[in-house]
Amino acid sequence: MKNDQKKQQVLKILAKNIRLLIEKEKLEFHKLQEIHLRIGKELYVVYENKEKFLGEYGERHITTKDEVRETMEYISQYSIYAYEQQIRQGFITVEGGHRAGISGQVVQNGGQIKTISHVSSINIRVAHQIKGCADKVFPYVAENGQLLHTLVISPPGCGKTTLIRDMIRQISDGNKYIKGITVGVVDERSELAACYQGNPQNDLGMRTDVLDCCPKAEGILLLIRSMSPKVIAVDEVGTEEDFKSLRYALTCGCRLLASVHGKDLEEVSKKPFFGQMIQGQWFERYIVLSTKKPGDVSEIYDKRGNGLCKSF
């Protein structure tokens, strides 16, 4: 995505006052990561992995209730109800794949989250697809032209979704390690494809089918029945239902690409259901990401837990 296009997509969902403050900063949008609005708090962005406070005349700008309300109107295109399915998960995806995370008063119905009203804070995460970031792992996760069942292990914010996204694209389009094959993606939180009105904003490859905002367990079964994927890709597995569906996918002959939050393989093995999965050697490769720099690989293990490589 061109920098100017990304800039316009982000600016048009911001309240006018905040838009002007960001334009005055002359930020390079390929370096802009997040924009934080909290009622009664200082406005700041995350730029090149550092917080940068915005304001005029040497004073930091305090975000107002009206600015949050105006921003929500632009984000939802003046129809909050049309976005309730996304809002109940805490975010709205806008054109370009940018995500507006929201918090405020939670409204429940029958013990389930219905929506979030009286929004008090918004975190706009600027989409950045990094094509080629998975190049380094393919020599370890492919064998005889096929993807090995792979689990990516990473603490939050260390680049697992970015890595999986590029792995999906390359598996789908094909590269020197894998011939292009069909991939079914269950994108429960709209993070992999970043669909906007059902259309993926991120490039996941020419042979990829996406179920957006769909629970992983139901989505895996639906894709297998309807789209005949050779690879099933999901982000952040963890529930018993997720594991039952992954097991079903294995019995159907699908290759698996998934991720989980965790510090290392030992920590993940202690999580519910994961110990059984690791002992059963469901996955043939475990990629552990580093906490030092987003996207860096700490270690790669085989299905028996033997280290194949370190730190690259």
Image: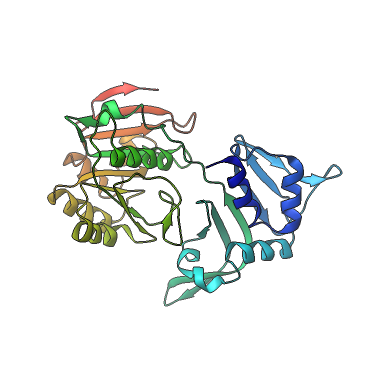
Give the number of marks: 0
Q: Position of residue 95 (x, y in %)?
A: 53, 55
Q: Which of 16 and 141 is in front in this view?
A: 16
Extreme-bottom residue of the structure: 110
Q: Which of 87 and 16 is in front in this view?
A: 16
Instruction: Indicate how the structure is coloured in the image.
Output: rainbow
Quarter of the image for the C terminus: give it. top left
- Which residue is drawn at the image coordinates 74% and 60% (left, top)? 64
Tell whether 94 sits left or right of 110: right
- Which residue is drawn at the image coordinates 36% and 26% (left, top)? 136
- Image quarter of residue 118: bottom right
Q: Judge whether 260 appears above or below 91 on screen.
A: above
Q: Where is residue 75 in the image (x, y as percent from the top left)?
A: 59, 62
Q: Position of residue 153 (x, y in %)?
A: 35, 38
- Which residue is drawn at the image coordinates 46% and 32% (left, top)? 291
- Image quarter of residue 45: top right
- Which residue is drawn at the image coordinates 52% and 73% (left, top)? 81
Tell whether 75 sits left or right of 141: right
Tell whether 215 sits left or right of 222: right
Extreme-right residue of the structure: 57
Q: Where is residue 177 in the image (x, y as percent from the top left)?
A: 25, 29
